[in-house]
Amino acid sequence: MAPELIFGLYIFLLAAFVGYQVISGVPPLLHTPLMSATNAISGISLVGSIVAAGSHYTAVSTALGFIAVTCATINVVGGFVITDRMLRMFKRRERKRP
Amino acid sequence: MSVSYIEALYLAASVLFILGLRGLSSPETARRGMVLAEVGMFLAIVGTLLHRDIISYEWIIAGFVIGSAIGTAMGLLIPMTKMPERIALSHAFGGLAAALVGISEYYRHGAELGSVKMAAIGFEVLLGSLTFTGSLMAFGKLQGLITGVPVTYRFQNVSNISLVVVTLGIVAYLVVDPSRYPVFYTMLGSGFCLGVLLVLPIGGADMPVVISLLNSYAGLAAASTGFVLSNNVLIIAGALDGASGFLLSVIMSKAMNRSFTNVVFGAFGAVAESAAAGATAAHAVNEGTDADAATVLDNAQSLIVVPGYGMAVAQAQHAVRDLTRLLEQRGTTIKYAVHPVAGRMPGHMNVLLAEADVPYDQLYDLDAINDEFAKTDVALVVGANDVVNPAAKTNPRSPIYGMPVLNVDQARTVIVLKRSMNPGFAGIENELFVRPNTLMVFGDAKTTLNRIIAALKR
């Protein structure tokens, strides 16, 4: 097998384990913000789209890249905006009672 | 900029993503965590813009501007009750973006692709396209554009599984011979079909699992993009997203006492008919008015509120909060019991209640609160059904037997706010509604709650 693939699989599996561990620690309270946060983060496919849109191989790949950049940006920006909007709502009880 | 600088930025971004998700382990650190993740995203994008293959920026900037405008507008304007729909849509965008990058790569390299790259592109395009149409289907079901009832037909599972096998065969064929363009587009087409067909038989109540699964697929599609482009930050972010979606779907399936395969291939509605008959007919429903409910609540020392999807539909979360605040001022102890699959996505109820300013330390998980019902005066069920059905504990013939449910029936009095006597989305009778200690109040939850508040103030 190609060394590049092995290397990639190492990274993938280790990241998946780290992800599983980290995400096991997220309380059910925050499962919806978690979903929109991972959504925003997976908008990282933006970096692939950027290269496709900017490198002018052919008109078709530029067009596909442009649509992909738009979609991924919607996810990144929208995902972070909405996650923050949700997280701002989670408040503890005001401690005015003694 | 040299490649090693870009790689360093990507490495920093990966670490920041992990730290950002770690912040979500507590509401206090969550917002800080998201700032870290945002910085990571910014670094990754800056690094990519310096990529040597990029000749011109106009299309990139155009995409940024349009995407940011739509993203910000959606992010700020969408009401919290529409959150499941928004999440479904964003999975669709994520899937589409991944599929398009894969198509573009194939279009560029085509026949000269090595087998590893071709396999990666195959998975990327396949996962991306099925996530795209599957998420649009989920969106349609949530939004009511498509029926939320499971759509089933004969040989459905057999034909779906065959299509999966055939599609994987097509991917394998392309790995051997990447030069066949029509075969590639056939694969794309079957990806689109699969997304539709796999979500079609899944009912509204199973949406939390489906949304989590699609979340996982969107992540895996992004990770495959990373393999295609040999880009580590993509692999890592995709793996994080994939793991998160996978873990959530496991949690959701467990909370319904069903296996993955059962959710995906089970079509809940079909099983329900057999067992529904026995339970309720003999007893009479104990129907009350909002004034009766107010009297009960007035005398309660302790109250546990159990929200369900009905609360989201009626947008009753603010009315719930008004009621509990009033009772709290009169000295009643208030707690909320949130079942993991209440609502249409993981954490749905928590977000709605947080929106209505319910402090999160009043929100309790299934395990944390289930023993407390027996010590509680009143359990107020607002638009929840299957998650409070005692048949899950007592009736082995019930399709939801074995599903962990909230023990509301152990409270001294149960008040159920419900639109009508119709069974819930799963179509299962609920004997809780005919128990002697249950008071049913029919009508729109928001209206009823406001009437109860008015009666209490009198």
Image: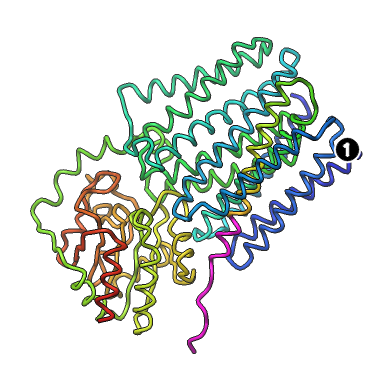
Residue B21, compared with residue B202, is above or below; it is below
Image quadrant where one finds the C terminus of chain B:
bottom left
Image quadrant where one finds the N terminus of chain B:
top right
Toward which corner of the image does residue B260 lie, by quadrant?
Answer: top left
Dot 1, crowdedness within 10 Å: few (<14), some or many (≥20)? few
Identity, as a three-letter code, of the amino acid under mark 1: Val
Toward which corner of the image does residue A57 lie, by quadrant?
Answer: top right
Task: Work out which residue is located at the far right of the displayed protein and give it.
Answer: B2
Residue beneath the point at 24% across and 55% down = B419
| Label tally | 1
Q: Taking A24 as reference, is B64 left or right?
A: right
Q: Taking B254 as reference, is B49 left or right?
A: right
Residue A85, compared with residue B84, is above or below; it is below
Region of the chain picked out in magenta, as a range: A83-98
**Magenta stretch holds residue A97:** yes
Residue beneath the point at 51% across and 25% down = B192
Which residue occupies the foreground of this view, A86 or B234? A86
Is residue B301 in sight in this rendering? yes
Residue beneath the point at 43% across and 23% down = B161
Is residue B407 in sight in this rendering? no
Which residue occupies the foreground of this view, B451 or A86? B451
Toward which corner of the image does residue B54 lie, by quadrant?
Answer: top right
Check disc 1 and report the residue beneath it: B3
x and y percent of residue B402 in the render? 31, 50
Judged from the image, the secondary structure of the residue bearing numbered disc 1 is helix
Residue beneath the point at 24% across and 66% down = B415
x and y percent of residue B194 in the render? 48, 26
Residue A77, compared with residue B261, is above or below; it is below
User: Which chain does the residue under circle 1 lie in?
Assistant: B
x and y percent of residue B8 in the render? 84, 46
Which residue occupies the foreground of this view, A10 or B93? B93
x and y percent of residue B353 in the render? 44, 64
